[in-house]
Amino acid sequence: MAESPIPLAELIAALRHELALAQQQGQGLAPRLRIDEVEIELQVVLTSEKNAGVGVKFWVLNADLKDKYSDATTQKIKLKLKPSADDGGDFTIAAEEK
């Protein structure tokens, strides 16, 4: 488990990687699976970093860190993502039809 909060961008990049891996591993398999929407709900902490010029950052908390940040203001956010293929079409987890 992570010992520090996970940057939101890092979590989304990991999710993107896992979806791409599932697509690669699904090549040649039936039935084809189309992902219409990916919905994730997260508990996040907002921090402000004025000296770095970054502004506000979102940090995702895992179960191990909830007690550590119990005094911090946490927010629950829900993200609805719609994966698409490189050509903008549907994202499928299976081989392309020939």
Image (tube, rainbow, N blue to C red):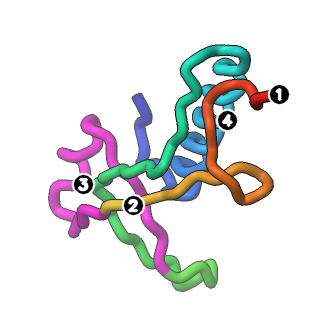
Label 2 near label 3: C-beta < 8 Å?
A: no
What number of labels is visible? 4
Which residue has dot 4 on it? 20
The three-letter code of the residue at mark 4 reads Ala
Q: Mark 3 or mark 1: name the one nearer the start of the chain.
A: 3
- Percent of width and height locating residue 94: 66, 26
Q: CA distance from mark 4 to mark 3?
A: 33 Å
Quadrant for the C terminus, please. top right
Q: Mark 1 or mark 4: name the one nearer the start of the chain.
A: 4
- Percent of width and height locating residue 29: 64, 15
Which residue has dot 1 on it? 98
Quadrant for the N terminus, please. top left
In this view, the residue in front, 1 or 15, is 15
The three-letter code of the residue at mark 3 reads Tyr
Residue that lies at the very extreme toward the right in this rendered image = 98
Q: Which secondary structure lies at badge 1? A: loop
- The residue mark sitting in front, 3 or 1, is 1
In this view, the residue in front, 41 or 82, is 82
Q: Mark 3 or mark 2: name the one nearer the start of the chain.
A: 3
Quarter of image, res 31:
top right
Q: Which secondary structure lies at badge 3? A: loop
The residue stretch that appears in magenta: 56-77
Q: Which secondary structure lies at badge 2? A: strand
Q: Mark 2 or mark 4: name the one nearer the start of the chain.
A: 4
For the point 24% across and 62% down, the residue is 76
Q: How busy is the neighbourhood of tag 4: few (under 14 within 10 Å), some, or many (20 plus)?
A: some
Residue that lies at the very extreme toward the front in this rendered image = 98
Q: CA distance from mark 2 to mark 4?
A: 19 Å
- Percent of width and height locating residue 73: 21, 69
